[in-house]
Image: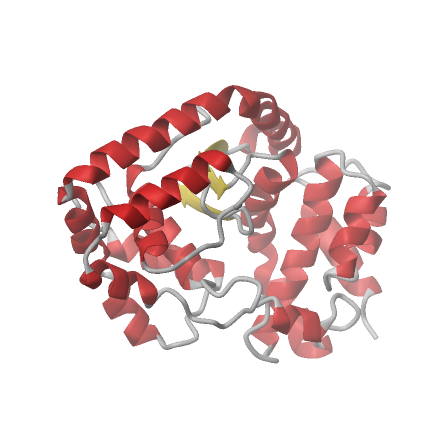
Amino acid sequence: MNIVNNKFLFYVSIGLTASGSDGYDHNDADISALVKQIHAAKFSDEIKFWFSRARTGQVEVNPYWPRGSALAVACFFIDETYIFKSDLFFDFIENTGVNDPIGAEDFKEWITELPDILREIDTKPVTALLWNEYCRIVDNRSPEWHDMIKKAVNAVEIFFGNNAPEIAFNPNLFTPYSADFVRIGNRIITISYTPDAETMLHETIHTAVAKYRDKITAYAEAQGLGNFADKNKMMEFGYMENESADSAAHVIEECFVRAIAVTLSGGNDERLRFHAEYGCNSVPFIASYIRRIKLSYANLGELIHDVLDKMKT
């Protein structure tokens, strides 16, 4: 099944909305109506305060980065009895390179309380009604998602071949401005507003490019960000937390992933220029290399090597 709907992720949306988050699409009539119902339910001050701590203010365009994304991912490591597989969660977060601006210990103490907070939300009688309404909205929209998901699945199978992971989509209809992913075994779940092929490929390709992180980090240590991206924009949008080689490597990896996702999803030059305009300057250049070869999981390392070599100053 390619469409899943994690109940705890919806509970997180309830908590964030109750605490003041208003990043939903205000033109989405269904979600706007649901937001009103959440506010009318008057969840406790304790719940509101706990979720208010997700707002780091680190990035102006998404003040809930990175804690909002961490919350979304954590929901997939909590089972129906509220047992939190925290070790697996923290390993995943560490491997994705997400760092909390407030501090590791504060973050760990805060997020390990999530199961208790979710349980409290679940005990409120109105929560079941809200969940049922959200499921109705998701069910009504799911038919239009199937073709989008199929396009992404086909592209993933062509790229990875026999190594193709299973990919799935979990809607998060309260956050149209962001996309996240989680890997459970061989299954990669994209968490976003809609399952457009580029977004789903983007999150899946991250797992492939991450295999070459040491090579990319070595380049960043020797060359810095080089010609890959606009450092100021990357800092502004939260892709770089500082000027370290690790942060530069994270951005370089992002440029590769964006170029590959656009190309494999059939995106045009306008999509490539869009990413360049937002600071990933090298995306069109990387895409030009991809178009010269039949890119696959098998020759991805060759592409990365060639581009890194060309980018040396």
Compared to 52, does 175 lie above or below? above
According to the image, what is the colour scheme of the structure?
secondary structure
- Residue 297 falls left or right of residue 116: right
> Looking at this rendering, what residue extends furthest in the bottom direction?
243
Image quadrant in which you'd find residue 102: bottom left
Q: Residue at x 33, y 65 (%)?
A: 52
Q: Position of residue 211 (x, y in %)?
A: 56, 53
The answer to whether residue 171 shows anywhere in this view is no
Q: Position of residue 146 (x, y in %)?
A: 55, 22
Look at the image and tell me in which quarter the N terminus lies: top left
Question: Residue 24 versus residue 179: which sits nearer the camera?
Answer: 24
Q: Residue at x 49, y 32 (%)?
A: 167
Question: Residue 52 versus residue 235: which sits nearer the camera?
Answer: 52
The answer to whether residue 135 shows anywhere in this view is yes
Question: Residue 209 versus residue 276: which sits nearer the camera?
Answer: 276
The mark tally for this picture is: 0
Compared to 105, does 47 lie above or below? above
Q: Residue at x 69, y 46 (%)?
A: 300
- Residue 30 falls left or right of residue 178: left
Q: Position of residue 57 (x, y in %)?
A: 47, 71
Question: Residue 6 versus residue 246: which sits nearer the camera?
Answer: 6
Compared to 102, does 93 lie above or below? above
Q: Position of residue 173 (x, y in %)?
A: 46, 40
Compared to 29, does 288 lie above or below? below
- Residue 223 falls left or right of residue 165: right
Image quadrant in which you'd find residue 231: bottom right
- Residue 161 falls left or right of residue 304: left
Look at the image and tell me in which quarter the C terminus lies: bottom right
Q: Residue at x 54, y 69 (%)?
A: 59
